[in-house]
Amino acid sequence: MVKLIANTPCGDLLPRAIGTVSLDEVIVDQITFVAPFNGQQKAVSDALKAAIGIGFPAPNRCIGTGPRAMWCGMGQALVMGASCPDLAAQCVDQSDAWAIVKVHGVDAAAVLARLTPLDLRASEFKRGHTARTLIGHMTGGITRSGAQSFEVMVMRSMAATLVHELTQAAENMHGRETSLR
Amino acid sequence: MRLPCPLCGERDRREFYYQGHATMLDRPARDAGIDAWDDYLHNRDNIAGEVEDLWHHEAGCGAWIKVTRNTVTHEVSGAKLVNGARK
Ligand SMILES: [Zn+2]
């Protein structure tokens, strides 16, 4: 049988390092979109907890370190890094559908602030917080994964635009810093 | 301008789509007659003061929200989820 070569969404566009900021692709082999049926959120949460150890996330939260559950809209979440059990929910396999970029470094928040209207200050947007928001002209998700780390995700078809936007913002930030020195 | 999404908290206006006055939630009955439908579709008061608008948190959680806003002071005094409001 023909063996196909799997390309990641960002392919050879990443990794990159610009100034103090690094851009790395995050590969998650399994992602399932989960939207509980009316009134079933508790049952779905219990079933998820039994199967993968984490429940259905509250709005704007991402929980878990191995398998994760990331809220991604009203009554919606992504189950990431684990196969999704049978649930009283509309479940859609979205593995390979998302481009996820880890933005890390001292200026990570400052770079993202050029692209999103979200308040990214550590006092407002803490580790484990996630948000659906704008990234440039795209809608996507931003999750804080550490003191100087964020995961930015958009649909796979916009991977190159995401890398372009992040690169441009990081270069502008870096250029500004070096010219002020 | 920032709008207080009941799910997401205070968010920038750019994340929202403006639909119009919240009167769109009060759809007349099918047989309500031409005047009721004319009012519903076309006639709006241009209020100086507190108004209720419908906004869609389009680039956020996807919820429709009813925002209370003052057109004189520009104060935004609250927002409620529309979800299930008529059930
Ligand atoms: Zn929202």
Image (cartoon, coloured by chain):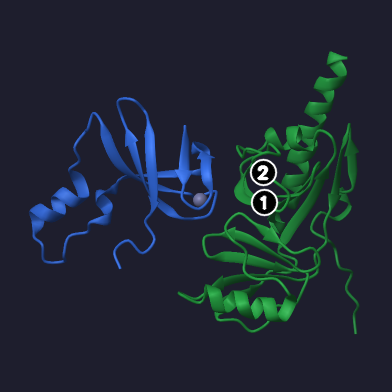
For badge 1, the amino acid type reads His
Looking at the colours in the rendered structure, which chain would you say is drawn in green? Answer: A
Q: Residue at x 37, y 56 (%)?
A: B82
Q: Residue at x 61, y 40 (%)?
A: A118
- Crowding around mark 2 (Cα neighbors within 10 Å: few <14, some 14 to 19, many 20+) is some
User: Quick one: SS at disc 2?
Assistant: loop
Label 1 and label 2: CA atoms lie apart by: 6 Å
Which residue was labeled with disc 1? A129
Which residue was labeled with disc 2? A125
- Crowding around mark 1 (Cα neighbors within 10 Å: few <14, some 14 to 19, many 20+) is many
Looking at the colours in the rendered structure, which chain would you say is drawn in blue? Answer: B
Quadrant assignment, res B47 = top left
For badge 2, the amino acid type reads Phe
Q: Quadrant of the C terminus of chain B?
A: bottom left
* Picture coordinates of residue A56, whole percent (x, y): 62, 69
User: Quick one: SS at disc 1?
Assistant: loop
* Picture coordinates of residue A94, whole percent (x, y): 68, 69
**Chain of the residue that carries numbered disc 1 in the rendered image:** A
Q: Residue at x 62, y 50 (%)?
A: A131
* Picture coordinates of residue B49, whole percent (x, y): 25, 30
Please report contact status of discs 1 and 2: CB closer than 8 Å, yes or no: yes
Which residue is at the far top?
A180
